[in-house]
Amino acid sequence: MPKDNTDLCQHYYIRDDENKPYACVAIIPLDFQEGKVCRGIAICSDKDQWNKRGARGRAVSRAIKAHADGKHSLQCRNAKRPVISDFLHNHGQEFSVPVPTHMHGPTDVMAVFKSAHNVAVTEREKRLMEYLQSKIDSEKFNV
């Protein structure tokens, strides 16, 4: 495996009902066996025109931030914005991670973060991880 996992960063887009991208997700593998990654999410503003390059850059930088900081940050909270509300409604469960809290007793509260560290992969990310593992195994990366 490359020395710095950020070299293995992969991204994909989430599309709306009209097949237009409205979110970009970037992952950096942490553990191939356990399926753990750092994840960065960039959600397009409902007032902006979609820009793949800008969204990809934000998603990748958020994944790198999670990798460097070793923690979650940038919680998705503004459900009043239609695009955030739609994202949380359609993908909230898929991207939710437990957030320990002392106020709610021993159980964790689930939340979605735009920058998440050491989280389980989604089905789509699992396929990306398998693809990366096959590239590593076939030595297409400089190991």
Image (spheres, rainbow, N blue to C red):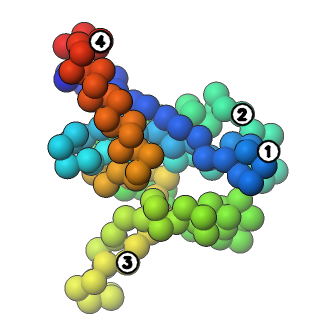
Ranked by sequence position, the earlier of labels 2 and 4 is: 2
Label 4: how many Cα within 10 Å (few below 14, some 14–19, many 20+)? few
**What's the residue at 39%, 30% (across, down)?**
9
Callout 1: SS: loop
Which residue is identified by label 2?
Answer: 51
Marked residue nearer the N-terminal end (3 or 4): 3
Residue 78 lies left or right of residue 72; in this view the side is right
Task: Say if mark 3 contacts mark 1, CB within 8 Å.
Answer: no
**Lower sequence index among marks 3 and 1:** 1
User: Which is more N-terminal, label 3 or label 2?
Assistant: 2
Find residue 99 and report its image quarter. Answer: bottom left
- What amino acid is at disc 2? Asn
Residue 81 horizontal side relative to residue 111, left or right: right
Q: Nearer the viewer, mark 2 or mark 4?
A: 4
C-alpha span from label 1 to label 2:
8 Å
Instruction: Examine the rendered structure and indicate whether residue 117 appears above or below residue 8.
Output: below
Residue occupied by mark 1 = 48
Using the image as rendered, state which of residue 52 and residue 100 is in the foreground. Answer: 52
Q: Is residue 117 above or below residue 62?
A: below
Mark 4 sits on what residue? 140
Give the class, few, some or many, for how many residues have Cα within 10 Å of label 3's Cα (few <14, many ≥20): few
Tell us which disc is closer to us: 3 or 4. 4
Earlier sequence position, callout 1 versus callout 4: 1
Label 3, label 4: how far apart the Cα atoms are: 41 Å
**Residue under numbered circle 3:** 109
Q: Secondary structure at mark 3?
A: strand
Dot 2 crowding, Cα within 10 Å, few <14, some 14–19, many 20+: few
Rendered image quadrant of residue 49: top right
Can you give x and y, in whole percent of width and height, for residue 10 in the image? 43, 32
Q: Please, what is the three-letter code of the amino acid marked with disc 4? A: Lys
What residue appears at the point 26 percent right and 29 percent down from the top-left corner?
133
- Mark 1 touches mark 2? (CB < 8 Å): yes
